[in-house]
Each structure stands twice: as C-alpha cells, then as structure tokens.
Image (tube, helix red, strand yellow):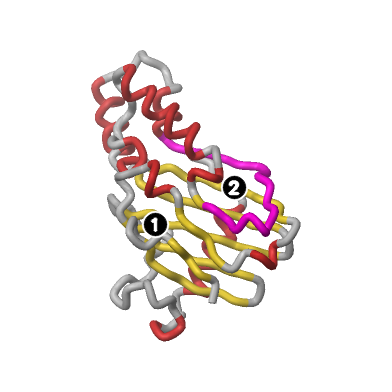
Amino acid sequence: MHMPTFILIAASLLMTVAPVSAAEKHDHSHDEDLPRDLGSHVHGEVLLNLVLEANRLDVEMISPAMNITGFEHAPSTEEEQQAIKKAVALLGDTGNLLALPDAALCEPGPATIETSLMDEHAGSHEETAADHEHDGEHAGHAEFHVTHRMECENAAAIDSITLELFRHFPGVEMVRVQWIHGQRQGAAVLEPDNRLLRFD
C-alpha cells in the first residue's frame, strides 16, 4: 500500500517526541503510556500525529482496521463492503476525527484514506486457496491510514483540539497523540472520557 509523503513527517515527529519526559507531558497522559513506534498494531489503539506550522495543520491517523470496521479480513459480504464504504466516508470528513476552536477559521484541504481492505476487495475474484491463505495473513494486520490538511486563517487560536473519532468509532479505546505546534512538541494519551488535547 502506498504511503503518502506525510508519513516521513510522522516518522520524524516520533523520533523527536519520544524523549519527552513525563514531566513535560500533559497531565491527562499516563506515565506508563509511552509512544509506540510507527509499526505497532494494537487493537483499540490509534496513533494520531499533528503538525501545525504557520497556517497549515497536517493530520495523520493510523489505526488497525478492527477499530474502524470491526474486522480486518477482506470483505466477503455486502454488509462488510458497506461497513468499509461508511468508514471511508466518515474518515474523509475532518470533523469526524477532531474539532478545532471556531476562532481558528480552518478550512479542510486535501485528504487521503488508504486501507488494504479496499485493495484486497478490488482484486480478481479468481483466486486459489493459497491466495486466500495469503490474503488472510495480510488482512490480519490491515490498517487505515488517513491524512488531512487544513488551512487556518487564525492558527494562533488553536490552543486545544477535541477528538471526535471516539464518537464515531466505538472500537477506538485509546489515542496516542504526538504533536508539533510551531517550536513546541509533545505527546499525550487520550481516551473516550478525556478527549481534550491542550497545547501547553
């Protein structure tokens, strides 16, 4: 699966944020919840990278497909195909992932949504038993990789972000956020009952 260029930003962010001490993290993060590497695949957990530079906000979300659709195998029924279509539609709207202060005056820009679940479904139906076995192994670690870019007239007003994806995807139990806000950076862990990320 092709990964957008923004993945390079995320990798750099992970390397720079990882050394942040517990004292520098937000109060609502847990000491034991250290940032994981980009290759981690843990059901219930989502990795969210945020980069705010000048008037542009880049958002990257990486999640096991299980959190989003409730399954990770290639869709075999109409219901599963519709679940993927619904997930793609929801993920395509930035407002379903996070909410920004109204005063920031942000407008959505380019977005990408990638998942091997769609790649697998798009393939030929003339498959052998060996093909299905291989697909099953691959789909067992299927993910959604989502990027959004927003342009904000008043980016200085972005002092916090509220995560909305918990409302739409009940399979998400924890979001590990890593962020760069101008010259500042940090990490936090958010949960359904604690959805507010403060840049302080």
Numbered disc in front, either 1 or 2: 2
Residue that appears at 39% across and 82% down: 22
Q: Is residue 83 above or below residue 113?
A: above
Residue 110 % position (x, y): 66, 42
Q: Is residue 113 magenta?
A: yes
> Of helix, strand and loop, which one carries label 2?
strand
Q: Main secondary structure of the magenta part?
A: strand
Within 10 angstroms of label 1, few (less than 14), some, or many (20 or more) residues?
few
- Displayed quadrant of residue 67: top left
Segment colored magenta = 99-116
- Displayed quadrant of residue 92: top right
Residue 138 % position (x, y): 33, 38
Q: Is residue 98 above or below residue 183?
A: above
* Amino acid type for the residue under numbered disc 1: Gly
Say whether residue 51 is left or right of residue 65: right
Say whether residue 109 is left or right of residue 7: right
Q: Residue furthest front?
A: 103
> Of helix, strand and loop, which one carries label 1?
loop
Residue 5 % position (x, y): 61, 51
Mark 1 or mark 2, earlier in chain:
1
Q: Is residue 54 magenta?
A: no
Within 10 angstroms of label 2, few (less than 14), some, or many (20 or more) residues?
many
Q: Label 1: which residue?
A: 39
Residue 172 % position (x, y): 33, 49
Q: Is residue 189 above or below residue 138?
A: below
Residue that appears at 28% across and 50% down: 43
Q: Label 2: which residue?
A: 148
